[in-house]
Amino acid sequence: MRFWLILSAVAMPVCAQVVLPATGKKFDSRTISGSGGVSVGAVTRPPAPTKTRLTSYFMLGDSRQWKSTDGKSLLGAIIIFEDAVIEFDAANPAAAKEAAGKAPPPKMPEKPTLIREGKIRLLVNQKPLEVPLTRLSAEDRKYVDDLNARLPK
């Protein structure tokens, strides 16, 4: 019993010790100025004008369910590889709306590209997605081939 009393009396101060970090108590301070009364300052530049791009995609039909060879499906509209892009200054939204209103609607190219390097493009959730023809089901490949045959060459 005495042993435990002695051990607890010795261990109690060890458990209650507080450890302080070994950082300095005072930090050095510096001034940013040159000698002879010349001070160093930051050079401010006007912000670069930002351009906003408005991209229009040419859809060749309504959205439909596309099926892959492994049975997965995807809802999207088939689009051609050519896009219509309008750039305008983002700093002046009123001028951008006016420019977009005055701009003629984009025209589809005379020879649209539906298949490039064995891929087609689908517009899925407002974003273009390239899909290899080999990943499409036989029914969807036939649909793409029929659509491609109807396009001007």
Image: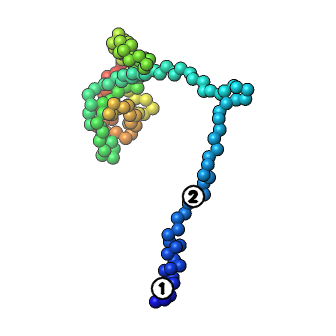
Residue 118 visible in image: yes
Horizontal placement of 89 versus 79: left or right?
A: right
Horizontal placement of 32 versus 83: left or right?
A: right
Task: Kindly indicate whether the residue at mark 1 contacts the one at mark 2 (C-beta within 8 angstroms).
Answer: no
Image quadrant where one finds the C terminus: top left
Horizontal placement of 35 versus 113: left or right?
A: right
Residue at x-position 36% and y-position 31%: 127
Residue placed under numbered mark 1 in the picture: 4
- Residue 85 percent coordinates (x, y): 41, 20
User: Does 17 sit above or below residue 115?
Assistant: below
Name the kind of residue labelled 1 in the image. Trp
- Residue 131 percent coordinates (x, y): 38, 36
Q: How many marks?
A: 2
Give the camera-side residue of 96 and 142: 96
- Residue 101 percent coordinates (x, y): 33, 12
What kind of element bears circle 2? Answer: loop
Name the kind of residue labelled 2 in the image. Pro
Q: Which mark is residue 57?
A: none
- Residue 15 percent coordinates (x, y): 50, 72
User: Does 138 sit above or below residue 94?
Assistant: below
Extreme bottom residue here?
Answer: 1
Give the camera-side residue of 2 and 118: 2
Residue placed under numbered mark 2 in the picture: 21
User: Does 80 sit above or below residue 26?
Assistant: above
Of mark 2 and mark 1, the one earlier in the sequence is 1
Q: CA distance from mark 2 to mark 1?
A: 33 Å
What kind of element bears circle 1? Answer: helix
Quarter of image, res 97: top left
